[in-house]
Image (tube, rainbow, N blue to C red):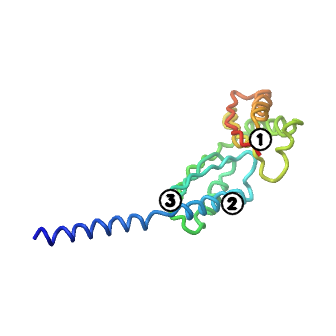
Amino acid sequence: MRRFLLPVVAAILLSQVLLAQRDQPSARSTERIEKEVRHELLMLPWFGVFDNIAYKVDGYNVTLLGQVVRPSLKSDAERAVKGIEGVEKVDNQIEVMPPSPMDDRLRTRLFRAIYGYGPLQKYDLGVQKPIRIVVKNGRCTLEGVVDNETDKNLAGIRANGVSGLFSVTNNLRVVPN
């Protein structure tokens, strides 16, 4: 009886391992999904400088993170990512900023202070701005990328110079060209 059970148990275990491996995406498919998610998010028509959308890819599942000003952008992002071949589940954790005329005025003043400043004007080129300005309840968070530590510090200094803000958090990352 044991001679018969041992091969059967081994066959069952082997089939379980093969099924588990088949369900795991390859590195190539994960990389393809990441590139397509990034592309789809950047192509969203209302994705602007005051929005910050990040994502995590875990196998065939995508988690959307960040903050947006327009509620429709949250649903547009989810819809765009769901349409990518290979994506099975989208966990949309994007936060919609509460409407606030005060925050809107701060966003405009922060944009002018950062992108209107000579040494930082190079970041104003192109459609997608690399420095994201997120404002919620009078608090500013800078997200995105800059070329060097000096530009990161300049952006933080310029943001801190805008009156009416309660705080500025500088989360800019330095990614050299």
Q: 29 or 163, which is in the foreground?
A: 29
- Seen at 55% across and 61% down, the residue is 30
- What residue type is disc 2 on? His
Q: Which of the two labelled residues, at mark 3 and mark 1, occupies the earlier sequence position?
A: 3
- What residue type is disc 1 on? Asp
Mark 3 vs 1: CB contact within 8 A: no
Q: Mark 2 or 1, which is nearer the eye?
A: 1
CA gap, disc 2 to disc 1? 21 Å
Left or right of 14, for residue 129: right
Left or right of 21, for residue 161: right
Q: What residue is shown with label 2?
A: 39
- What residue type is disc 3 on? Gly
Q: What residue is shown with label 1?
A: 147
- Give the quadrant of the N terminus: bottom left
Q: Secondary structure at mark 2?
A: helix
Left or right of 6, for residue 135: right
Q: What residue is shown with label 3?
A: 59
CA gap, disc 2 to disc 3? 18 Å
Q: Quadrant of residue 111 in the image? A: top right
Query: Counting other residues with Cα less than 10 Å from the Cα at mark 1, is it few (<14), some (14-19), or many (20 or more)?
Result: some
Q: 87 or 8, which is in the foreground?
A: 8
Q: Which of the two labelled residues, at mark 2 and mark 1, occupies the earlier sequence position?
A: 2
Q: Quadrant of residue 104 in the image? A: top right
Q: Where's residue 41, x and y in %?
A: 67, 57
- Seen at 67% across and 46% down, the residue is 52
